[in-house]
Amino acid sequence: MNRVEEWVVEPEMAGLRLDLAINQKHREISRTLAQEMLKNGEIKLNGQTVKSSLKLRGGEKIWITFRDDEPEQEIKATELDFPILFEDKYMIAINKPAGLVVHPGAGKEKTTVVSALLGHTKLSPIGAPTRPGVVHRLDKETSGVMILAKTRDAHRKLAEAFASHELEKEYLAIIQGHIVNRKGRIEVAVERDKIHRKRMKATSSEKGRMAISQFEVIEYLKSNTLVKVRIMTGRTHQIRVHMAFTGHPLLGDVTYGGKRFEKKAEHFLHSSRLVLKHPISGKEMILEAALPERFAGVLEQLRNDTQPNSE
């Protein structure tokens, strides 16, 4: 049975951010975990779902749902048909295929990363019933290294590591055209597009959240470029927005100005390498994922179409 705890915000907490107040009241709930629980509806203020940045006035009622270690099985398990890169009793790392969403969303997808893993193992109850174990996400068309938590403690520590950028995240991407600089650093803030709500856009630091990416050219192709991208922050669609900002959107990424490849709306972005510390042992882990067949095949096709150049 889930346990629900209710408390009234003390007057001395007036002016504090909601996530900070929760952390001060419940030391076992970090600010990062509080933010995740607020997103999942596990914490409500006066019966409403609110943002973690909300400033308290004092006197509000807060309800916190502490879930059992057994996630609610609202998601029906499906077949696991993608590679597992690492697994122990605390976490699991996979090579996510392109075209698969992480968890059910507005589209009510039945086959997801979460549904496949629930047929294989137990996941952390945080985020249940629809997002158990999820500490970070990859876009539907993005493939590669992804990790999920199996226990509450591992979930909390992994979420904190992602939030504080205590990891190395490296991607491979095929972008349109030939980017002039072989190496570069992009520091451009990102915010949600107010008209097209499923899109993000580059903006000023006053309006959005700063995002930092470093890229390096791996190979020039005839009309495209294979680049390696390391991200220092983890904003939604960060690489896609940043590369479009340079004038070189991802190949096939029609959302951000890319041209369809073989009449398909698919982008070529792969989370190739993730370096982090194990959430429990603290041991450094290097997780690497091989390119999916589709990405590798398109890359080879573009190579065969390459003409010698002096770049």
Image (spheres, grey):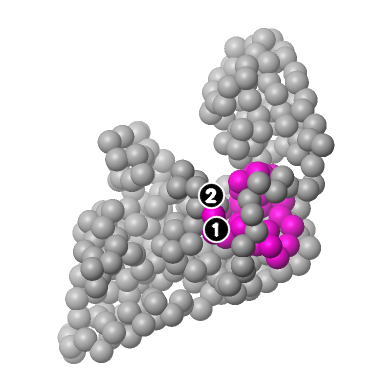
Q: Residue 108 versus residue 133: which sits nearer the camera?
A: 108
Amino acid type for the residue under numbered disc 2: Pro
Label located before the other in sequence (2 or 1)? 2
Q: Is residue 15 above or below residue 108?
A: above
Q: Where is residue 142 drawn, in percent x and y? A: 43, 63
Which quadrant does the C terminus fall into?
Answer: bottom left
Q: Where is residue 48 drawn, in percent x and y? A: 58, 22
Say the numbered circle drawn on residue 112.
1
Left or right: residue 277 compared with residue 169: right
Residue at image location 32% in from the left, 75% down from the top: 226
Magenta extent: 110-136
Let me know if residue 125 is in the magenta part. yes
Left or right: residue 19 compared with residue 264: right
Say the numbered circle drawn on residue 153.
none
Residue at image location 61% in from the left, 48% down from the top: 131
Q: Is residue 273 above or below residue 242?
A: below
Residue 240: image quadrant is bottom left
Q: Is residue 142 above or below residue 68?
A: below
Let me know if residue 53 is in the magenta part. no
Amino acid type for the residue under numbered disc 1: Thr
| Mark 1 neighbour class, 10 Å CA radius: few under 14, some 14 to 19, many 20 or more | many
The residue singled out by tag 2 in the image is: 104
Q: Where is residue 304 drawn, in percent x and y? A: 25, 89
Residue at image location 58% in from the left, 72% down from the top: 81
| Mark 2 neighbour class, 10 Å CA radius: few under 14, some 14 to 19, many 20 or more | some
Residue 88: image quadrant is bottom right
Distance, label 2 to label 1, CA atoms, is 7 Å
Q: Is residue 192 above or below residue 261?
A: above
Q: Are marks 2 and 1 in contact (CB under 8 Å)?
A: yes
